[in-house]
Image (spheres, grey):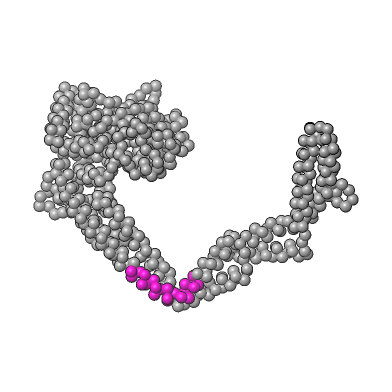
Amino acid sequence: MLSLLHIENIAVISQADITFDKGFNVLTGETGAGKSIVIDSIGAIMGERTSRDLIRTGAKSARVSALFRDLPELPWFEEQGIGPDENGELLIERAIQGDGKNACRVNGRPLLVTQLRELGQQLVNVHGQHDGQQLLDEECHLGYLDSFGGTEKEMEAFSLAYAQVRDLRRELDQLQMDDGEKARRMDTLTYQIDELERAGLREGEDEELSQRREVLRNAERLTDAVDGAWQALTGGEDGEGAVSLIMEAGNRLTQGGRYSGELKELAEKAEQLRCDADDLAELVRDLRGTLDFYPGELDEIEERLDRLYRLKKKYGGSVQEMLAYLDKCRQELDAIQFSEDRMAKLDKELSKALEKALKLGRKLSDRRHKAAEELSGRIQSELKQLDMPKVQFQVEFAPKDVSDGMDATGMDTVRFLMSANVGEALKPINKIASGGELSRIMLALKNVLAETEQVSTLIFDEVDTGVSGRAAVKVAQKLFQVSKGRQVLCVTHLPQIAAMGDVHFSVEKGEADGRTFTQVERLDRERRREELARLSGGQTTAVMLEGAEELLATAEAYKVGAKRAK
C-alpha cells in the first residue's frame, strides 16, 4: 500500500507530506483547492507523463517521493532485480527539472521512466472521473471483457496465426499482377541487374578509390616529405643519418658504461632509441613504395568514381547499398519468373494458415462468451449493491463485418447493453445511461476487474459524478467494502462518501507572502464534522453540524455492522 507521499514544488503545493493508512482514505476540498495536484503527483511516481509546467513558479525543480509497504510479490521485482528492502519498504522518487528532464529512482537505483511506468501499473490503479466516457465508447468494451476474462493466452495464439495470414496475403497481392505489368517489371529489373553486374561492384571500393585519389593528387608533396624523412633517418648514400648517429652515440655510452652505472643506463636508452629509429625508417621506406603510380592512374580513378557516383544516384548512397539493391532485384525477378509456382504454394499455405486462425479465433470467442456470462452476473450483483436493483446488464456479441470474419482483435464485435428499469428493453449503454448510472456501472466494472489484479492501491478520482441521495450512500458503502481487501484513496465532493472514510484529508488553498499555496491536513473527528457540514451546505451552521454528526454516526454504525457480519 501507499504509506507516505512527499510533494515538493508541484504547482501550488510548496511542500506536503501525506501519510495514508490501510483501508478507506478520502480527500475533500473546494473546487480548485489542489486535490488534482495530489493525484497528479501520485501519477508522477507511477511513471505517467509529466511536464516542466508542473514546477511551482520560481522553483528550479519539483520532486515527488512515495513510500510503499506490505507489497505482494510482483513480476516486475523479479524482472528488474529490484524489490522492497529488508524492512519491506519500497521508495520511489522522481525529480522534474526545469529543462524537462526527469530523474527516477527506486530504492536509490536509477530507472527509466518506461520502467517506472511498468512498476506503477502493478502498484496503483487510478480510476478517474473521465473513465465513464470510455464506457460510452464501444471500442473499449472488448478490452474490458478480455481483461476480465484473462484471454491473454488465447489472444496471443490467435494474433500469431492471424499475422501469418496477413503476411501470406500481402505476398500474394504483390505477385498477382497482369501479364503486361509483369513484363514491364521484368524488363526494368533485368536492365537494373545488368547495369549493376556490369559495374563489377566491390564492397568498400568507393572509400578505397577516394583515399587513393587523394594520395595521387598530392603525390609530389608526399614524395618530397617521405624522401626527406628517409634521407634524414638513413643519410642516404652520401652521409650519416639519424639512425647511424644514434648508433654512434650508443657505442660511446656503452664504452663509458664500463666505468659508470649512470652511463650504462643511458646506453640502454640509446639502444632503444636506435631500434625505434630503425623501425621508423622501415615504415618510411614501405610508405614510399605506395607512392609509386603509373601514368593515367589518376584519370582512371576519377572515371571510376564518376561511374559509381552516377550509379549511387540511382541505386543507393554507397556501394554496400547498391549491392543490397542488386540482391533484392535478383530475388524479385526470380519471384516473378516463378510466380505461378510460388502463388500455388502460397495458396496452400494461406489455406492452412486461415484454417488455423479461424480455429483459434473460435476458441478465443468461446472463452469470451463464457467470460461475458460471468461478467454480466457480476456486474448486476455489484449494481444491486449500488442502488440499481432492477438493472439488467448484458454483453452483446456480433460477428466482424470484415474479410474472413476476423481482424487483429479476433472474430467478435462486443458492446455492453443495459436496462435500468423493469419492462424496458436492453439497449446500448451510450444510448440510455445517465451520468449517475455511468458512474456506478464504471465503479462496478472497475471493482470486478480489480479482483483479477494484484494491485494493492486503488484511487478513485471524483468517480461520483451524477450520484446523490441514497445512491451516494450505496456508492460510499461499496467503496468501503472494496477497501477491506485493499487500500482505497478517493477524491470526492459527496459528504456521504467522505463520512465513510477511515481517514479523512482536507485539501485547502491559502495565501502567504503574496503567494498561493495548498496544504493537506489530516482531520480529527471534530474537523471532519466541520468539513462534512461544509460539503453538505457550504457553511458550518448548527443545523449543518448536526447533520454532519448524523452522517458520521451512521457511517460508523455501518462499519461496525459490516465488521460483525464478516
Query: In front: 345, or 89?
Result: 89
- Residue at 27%, 64% (x, y): give it: 359
Q: Estimate the x, y position of residue 283 in percent, counting from the top left.
A: 75, 51
- Residue at 43%, 69% (x, y): give it: 174
Is 386 left, or right, of 115 in this rendering?
A: left
- Residue at 77%, 59% (x, y): give it: 292
Query: In front: 11, or 121?
Result: 121
Q: Quadrant of the N terminus?
A: top left
Q: Is residue 522 magenta?
A: no
Look at the image and tell me whether residue 438 can be seen. no
Look at the image and tell me whether residue 165 can be seen. yes
Dominant secondary-structure state across the stretch colored magenta: helix
Is 500 located above or below residue 451 in the figure? above
Is 319 left, or right, of 519 in this rendering?
A: right
Q: Estimate the x, y position of residue 348 in percent, counting from the top left.
A: 36, 72
Q: Is residue 349 magenta?
A: yes
Q: Estimate the x, y position of residue 434 in percent, counting from the top left.
A: 19, 45
Quarter of the rendering containing residue 451: top left
Q: Which residue appears farthest toward the right when viewing the image? A: 238
Q: Estimate the x, y position of residue 321 in percent, counting from the top left.
A: 56, 61
Residue numbers of the magenta segment? 332-352
- Residue at 16%, 41% (x, y): give it: 386
Is 71 located above or below residue 319 in the figure? above
Q: Which residue appears farthest toward the left when viewing the image? A: 423
Q: Quadrant of the C terminus?
A: top left
